[in-house]
Amino acid sequence: MRNRVSAIAILPLSLLGLAACGGANAPSGSNTPTPNAAHLGPGATLALACSGCHSELNGAIASLSAYSETQLQDTLARYKTETDGTTVMHRLARGYSDEDIALVSAYLGHEETAP
Amino acid sequence: MSDLINRRLLLQSGLLGTALTALPLPAYSQARASIMIVGGGFGGATAARTLKRLLPNAQITLVETNPIFTSCPFSNLVIGGERDLSAQQFRYEALEREGITVANVPATDVDADGKNITLDGDSVYAYDRLILAPGIDIRWNVIEGYDADAANILPHAWKAGPQTLLLRRQLEALDPGQNVVMTVPAAPYRCPPGPYERASLIAHYLKAQKPGSKLIILDAKDQFSKMALFQEAWDAHYSDQIEWRGASEDGAVRRVDTGTQTVFSDFESLSARVINVIPPQKAGWIADRAGVADATGWCPIDPLSFASRLQPDIHVIGDATIAAPMPKSAFSANLQAKVCAIAVARDLAGQTPRPTTLANTCYSYTTPDEAISIAGVYSNAASQLQSVTGAGGVSPPNADKAVRTAEAEQAAHWFETITKEAFG
């Protein structure tokens, strides 16, 4: 029988890419993240798909901001391989290669993006 | 662009060592480029905000007639009596605070060759880049007799706002036992599962408040989005309320008569106290004016950058595009806006767009506290968007109620998140 509700409610994929780039009006040099070329790399672009659902708001859809790169990568890999999952993340994760998952996890994982 | 080149650009532009808040535009490029965006829905608003982050020195102008945006997603809950229309409404103040110019005037013409746009009939503005996010317009009179006046009697409610409230009031005024008719067009149209979510929530209202009343759906097609899941919900909850007739059961409506409240298919006619005509659609009017819509009425695009295939200097995003298999949804518009914004920023820096993977998720309520979903993953590496094999699909059939209620909660969270990303 399928239909097991995932224990972690929909993956915490948060903080989509650009949200990590600081406030829109933040002048250069203000309290914004450390420069990181990955902000414009393929991981950042892949992560654009995450921020429509995942924000800093934690709830029925988890915030990703507390997740490390390793946690994200493990969770996405689990979504991808679980055959009895019921959430949209199970169906979405199957569309991403292991390399994609590594890239997006490196981009969103908190070590890389925490202010 | 490799991260190495990226880093070199950063060095050139003197941004390394400060904060990377935006794409590194070389100082010699159009750092103060003028970017016009027409249409303030999920696509246009998201594009404006994303570009302002990427290009803080650019002049970003969002052209949107209405100072208040009313969201179509979740408006079926308003029609079903479960939600207030004010919960659907968003202003553009956050965008203005971020330095985006919001012009509440109509865009009335576009000169693609001259790269200028006319606002409000007589003010002409030059732009460096133009993004059109015009949403949909109704194809009046394709269903004979269904014009803008008819919509005041037989609402479409396919653009949220007064039409939503009109349909809601008509349902409230229904006498128990009187029927409702909904007509549904052939694809493509905005929000493929939307009619069936609406049917579910109308049926939920009828069941609770209008004993004996029924909803008859006349559909111009024989298959629809999440069909098995909707039918499962209808069998479970609304077997006395919903009757669906597809194209092969003469479901395609050809003509309406507002005087007698009647719809006509090829062989039959049906009268009802409330008739919701979801009519055929096309890209919003300005797309035609700008020369980016083709004979289908929709806009062909290069999926790498969302540049128009017909006017390569104009970008088109959202419901107006031909992006199938990616559906006409708020999620799609929002993501296309972000991908397009990065492509525009890279273009201004002399860089070509780069392939990536896009996705879509659409939730539909089947009752006020249960929902089902469809998801898809798409590559934009080829000349058209393509579904990634093995990914995507719909919620499991015959699932526990907990699965359905979990998706209803996720849907509500999605709405909160995506409206915040688009409107602040």
Image (cartoon, coloured by chain):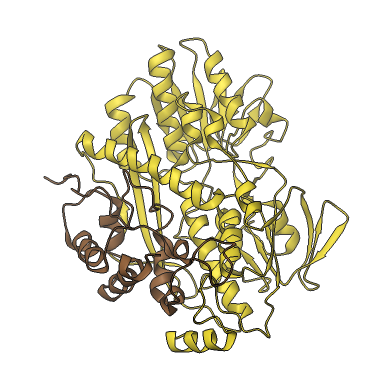
Q: Quadrant of residue B111?
A: bottom right
- Image point 70% across, 73% down: which residue? B32
Q: Position of residue A10 (x, y in %)?
A: 28, 50
Q: Position of residue B44 (x, y in %)?
A: 61, 56
Residue B88 relative to residue A84: left or right: right
Residue nearest the viewer, comparing B50 with B247: B50
Residue nearest the viewer, comparing B155 with A23: A23
Q: Quadrant of residue B143?
A: top right
- Image point 85% across, 62% down: which residue? B124
- Determine if residue B271 is in view: no
Residue nearest the viewer, comparing A44 with B74: A44
Q: Quadrant of residue B278?
A: top right
Location of residue B289 with respect to B24 vertically, above or below: above
Location of residue B124 with respect to B342 vertically, above or below: above
Q: Position of residue B341 (x, y in %)?
A: 56, 67
Q: Position of residue B264 (x, y in %)?
A: 58, 30
Q: Residue furthest front?
A: A30
- Determine if residue B260 is in view: yes
Q: Which chain is yellow?
A: B
- Image point 72% across, 55% down: which residue? B286
Residue nearest the viewer, comparing A78 with B314: A78
Residue A53 relative to residue B108: left or right: left
Location of residue B73 with respect to A79 vertically, above or below: above
Chain A's colour is brown
